[in-house]
Image: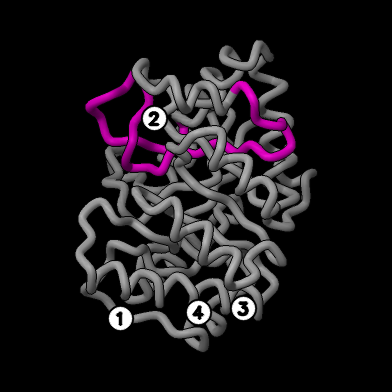
Amino acid sequence: MLVDSHCHLDRIKFAYGSGGIAAMLDVAAANSVTRMLSVATDLEHWASLASMTEPYPQVALSVGVHPNEDSVRAPTVASLVALGREQRVVAIGETGLDYYYGSGSSMQRQEIWFRIHIAAARELGKPLIVHTRNARTDTLRILRDEGAAEIGGVIHCFTEDWEMATQLLALGFYISFSGIVTFKNVKQIHDVVRQMPAERILVETDSPYLTPIPHRGKPNNPAWVRYIADYIANLRGESLDQVANFTNANYSRLFSLPLEEIM
């Protein structure tokens, strides 16, 4: 059994006839993907995300505003904490910094929102889901400044090098690998996968984005996390069952979910 630790179910266009999300979850289960975390990207659509996934106990949720979502309702500690107390919410995020398109004002706004998310996560005692791109120094600085090590979390869709990985591990963070790991020209990521302690690795699809090989060019979905786990197994010289077992245990530990429900 496998867990998709990061997907966006509200952004997937369900190509499963009239079955919608239920049919998609059946396909995931048929591929041994039994649990998933649907990650929020704004506050405006959080209620609809909660509503569409409410019938499915295998789907956990987060609350947060993605750093690139600059035309949405600004998060506050109070708003994140209020939604974060909902029973199915296991994390705060995704939050973080993305300077790929950033201007000075955008970067300042992202930093303020990042700090707000960390404060909310600390108040709730729930882990963070962190997005970082082209922002290594500031990401690490803010995590340290705001005491994020006290609650921990995961750096999702990791694309950095081993040096950054070691600093994040020292802060108590987990590292999650997406379909990017299946690409051939990402030697830096492959090197990190090989060196990672098993007890800190998660796998994710980031559906509907970042589709793994062999399905590049198609919308991603949680069923395909198995290709990511299998690729990691090959890189590390382990079996798929071994990777499934330790990533499931890590998901359970990080998000305080009963392991027996995942396995």
| C-alpha separation, residue under disc 2 versus residue under disc 3 | 33 Å
| C-alpha separation, residue under disc 4 versus residue under disc 1 | 12 Å
Residues under numbered marks 2 and 4 in contact, where contact means CB atoms less than 8 Å apart: no
Which quadrant of the figure contains the N terminus? top right
Residue 85's disc is 3
Mark 3: secondary structure: loop
Q: Residues within 10 Å of mark 3 (few under 14, many from 20)?
A: some
Q: Position of residue 191 (x, y in %)?
A: 54, 22
Q: Is 263 situated left or right of 183 in this image?
A: right
Type of the residue with mark 3: Arg
Residue 80's disc is 4
Q: Position of residue 2 (x, y in %)?
A: 61, 33
Magenta region? 194-223
Type of the residue with mark 4: Leu
Q: Earlier in the sequence, mark 3 or mark 4?
A: 4
Q: Quadrant of residue 32?
A: top right
Residues under numbered marks 2 and 3 in contact, where contact means CB atoms less than 8 Å apart: no
Q: Earlier in the sequence, mark 2 or mark 4?
A: 4
| C-alpha separation, residue under disc 3 versus residue under disc 1 | 19 Å
Q: Earlier in the sequence, mark 4 or mark 1?
A: 1
Q: Which label lies toward us, 2 or 3?
A: 2
Q: Which label lies toward us, 3 or 4?
A: 4
Q: From what the image shows, is residue 232 above or below residue 145?
A: above
Q: Earlier in the sequence, mark 2 or mark 3?
A: 3
Q: How many marks?
A: 4
Type of the residue with mark 2: Ile
Residue ID for mark 2: 180
Q: Main secondary structure of the magenta part?
A: loop
Q: Earlier in the sequence, mark 1 or mark 2?
A: 1
Residue 73's disc is 1
Q: Is 160 situated left or right of 119 in this image?
A: left
